[in-house]
Image (cartoon, helix red, strand yellow):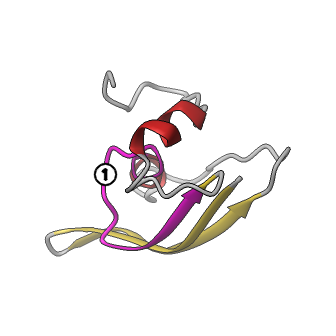
């Protein structure tokens, strides 16, 4: 299960993710769809522990990605259309 509340990520003066909230229940299939630059990859990078959010809260199977990095990475499954994450 994934829970995201009021997630924000800024880079200096640029806001890449602005107040995003969503829930994915157990057994649901979830997809991010949207134009380039909409913040999809940035949101995924925060959920998978590769970026720290500027503000907001995230939870994956009851775990905070900021404090339980290794456990969250073990539980997260993802398939991109094009590769966009680092080798870790």
Residue 31: x percent and y percent? Answer: 68, 46
**Is the C terminus in the top left, top right, bottom left or bottom right quadrant?**
top left
Residue 55: x percent and y percent? Answer: 36, 75
Seen from the viewer's position, the closer of residues 34 and 28 is 28
Compared across the picture, whether 12 is left or right of 58 comes to left
In the orientation shown, which residue stands out farthest toward the right? 27
Q: Residue at x 59, y 72 (%)?
A: 21
Compared across the picture, whether 20 is left or right of 54 comes to right
Residue that carries the numbered disc 1 in the rendered image: 51
Residue 84: x percent and y percent? Answer: 38, 32
Seen from the viewer's position, the closer of residues 65 and 88 is 65
Compared across the picture, whether 74 is left or right of 54 comes to right
Seen from the viewer's position, the closer of residues 82 and 75 is 75
Compared across the picture, whether 16 is left or right of 2 comes to left
Q: Residue at x 33, y 44 (%)?
A: 50
Mark 1 surroundings within 10 Å by alpha-carbon count, few (fewer than 14), some (14 through 19), many (20 or more): some
Q: Which residues are magenta?
A: 45-59
Q: Residue at x 70, y 64 (%)?
A: 23
Q: Residue at x 42, y 25 (%)?
A: 83
The vertical placement of 63 against 56, above or below, is above
In the orientation shown, which residue stands out farthest toward the top? 87
Element under disc 1? loop
Residue 62: x percent and y percent? Answer: 63, 57
Residue 29 belongs to the span the image colors magenta = no
The vertical placement of 59 against 47, above or below, is below
């Amino acid at each position: 299960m994934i829970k995201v509340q009021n997630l924000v990520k800024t880079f200096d003066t640029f806001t890449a993710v602005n107040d995003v909230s969503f829930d994915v229940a157990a057994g649901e299939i979830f997809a991010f769809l949207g134009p380039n630059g909409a913040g999809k990859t940035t949101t995924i990078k925060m959920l998978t522990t590769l970026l720290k959010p500027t503000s907001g809260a995230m939870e994956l199977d009851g775990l905070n990605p900021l404090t339980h990095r290794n456990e969250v990475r073990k539980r997260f499954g993802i398939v991109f259309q094009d590769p966009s994450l680092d080798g870790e």
